[in-house]
Image (cartoon, helix red, strand yellow):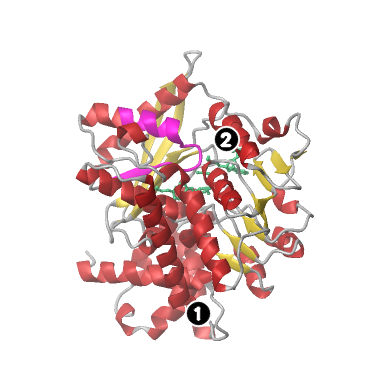
Amino acid sequence: MNNSHQQRIDEFMDEMAERNPNQPEFLQAVKEVVSHIIPFIGEHKKYQKINLLHYIAEPERVIQFRVPWFDDSGTLQVNRGYRVQFSSAMGPYKGGLRFHPSVNLSILKFLGFEQVFKNALTKLPLGGGKGGADFNPKGKSDAEVMRFCQSFMTELYRHIGPDTDIPAGDIGVGAREIGYLFGQYKRISNEFTGTITGKGISWGGTLIRPEATGFGLVYFLKEILAANDKEFKGLRVAVSGSGNVAQFAIQKLIEEGAVVISASDSSGYAYCKDGISQEMLDSLMKVKNEDRGRISDWADGTSEIEYFDDANVWDLSEEYDIALPCATQNEIDESLAEKIKSAGVIAVAEGANMPCTADAIKYFAQNNVMYAPGKATNAGGVAVSGLEMTQNATRVYWSEKKVDKKLRQIMHAIHQQCQNYGKQQNDSVDYEKGANLAAFTKVADSVLAQGLV
Ligand code: NDP
Ligand code: 2IT
């Protein structure tokens, strides 16, 4: 990168920091994208006419609201709810809802910003947004979760709609929460439309949506391996997280013949020397999804699973070939990236959104570890949400085979876009640059075509 580009990036980020104080995650996500876009704009006159970067980095609308609800003891609780409607350049706002105590505006703006580019890569007509609340569903009764979801939707419903903004799940928002949110939306609006995705299959959902993010991640990884004359068989894969994305990534990896050696949650991690079998995965899904238990409960009493309490899975000192972070943002910093490299890893593909810090990504680039960013690799989830919207709008249900085939095609096309825009002089692919530039051109062209104000 030449000095004038670096200077422009620094100036732009200084301005962003001033306009968005105390939003480190948002600034991190923006910097990651503009580092590629600024040199690209320098080479493409049509994007130089106007202040496109400022336009794209400013959400169209941010909604913040009070969410009051009564807990089981009759005490009033108050949480903070949000919806960041980031961009409608390419379609209605689309993106998940996160319920986690760490949720704040910085985190939701980073997620909304990334979502705009991710959704563009799917080639479906989707804008980008994200929302959620600083509510912790962990340890709450079903009735408490229901009351919270109903109160949350009682405000959110006026801002969303099947052609306006279509929320879905994310951390802490799974099948149960989507059900309660949709039920309340339907009740208030008196319409049964596809305003939320991730619905149950008997009430407007699509087959393969629960699986889509994890499956899509593995389909993408398969493309990376194939481009490097490699295949899954026998490769050892470390996975973090044990939620929706991790579970179905593990399932597809097992099908592909890989050996999955780990899963984790925020309390610790499980190491399975000989790999997680389908039977072990079934039991993990039961513990997590039905019993709402911990990884430690899964490991309890079994000899195949070694549990490490209060420990980070990326500290693992065993040898493995591939790392799939599927838990949360910034779970891998530079020192953990070094550990991952020394475990013998050839590729890191992000199931989570922004799980690697900027320094970790730099370390991978400098140390010959292939790195594929979440906006490309985890786009399968929102892609199948888009397919759910199509089915809802036309009032049909597609077969599992049809949805899975479309998901594979979409992941293949995203990989191709990364190759087209990220090919390096030595023929290797910079997936981060490829994803950013491929997405940027689509978003920017849509913005320019529609007029700016
Ligand atoms: P779930 O809530 O189903 O699972 C989240 C998992 O990550 C849990 O194992 C959780 O552990 C762990 N986790 C969450 N926060 C932390 C933390 N601060 N530190 C350590 N572990 C943590 O969420 P999903 O599987 O849906 O989401 C995982 C990631 O994938 C997120 O980054 C999300 O944005 C991203 N993603 C999700 C998509 C989807 O379709 N669901 C689509 C694309 C991306 P614990 O139970 O202890 O909190
Ligand atoms: O980060 C994501 O892409 C999601 N949480 C899924 C969004 C969606 O609308 O399905």
Say if residue 11 shows up in the picture.
no
Q: Residue furthest top?
A: 73
Q: Position of residue 426 (x, y in %)?
A: 58, 85
Quadrant (top left, top right, bottom left, bottom right) of the N terminus: bottom right
The residue indicated by pointer 1 is: 423
Is 79 situated above or below 1?
Answer: above
Taking the spot 65% from the left edge, 40% from the top edge, the residue there is 266
Is 130 situated above or below 156?
Answer: below
* Label 1 Cα crowd, 10 Å radius (few <14 / some 14-19 / many 20+): some
Taking the spot 33% from the left edge, 32% from the top edge, the residue there is 202
Instruction: Please tell me in which quadrant of the rendered image residue 342 appears.
Output: bottom right
Instruction: Please tell me in which quadrant of the rendered image residue 446 appears.
Output: bottom left
Give the number of the mark in front: 1 or 2: 2
Which type of secondary structure does the marked residue at label 1 adopt?
Answer: loop
Q: Is residue 166 magenta?
A: yes
The residue indicated by pointer 2 is: 285
Q: Position of residue 228 (x, y in %)?
A: 59, 73
Side (left or right) of 234 relative to 124: right
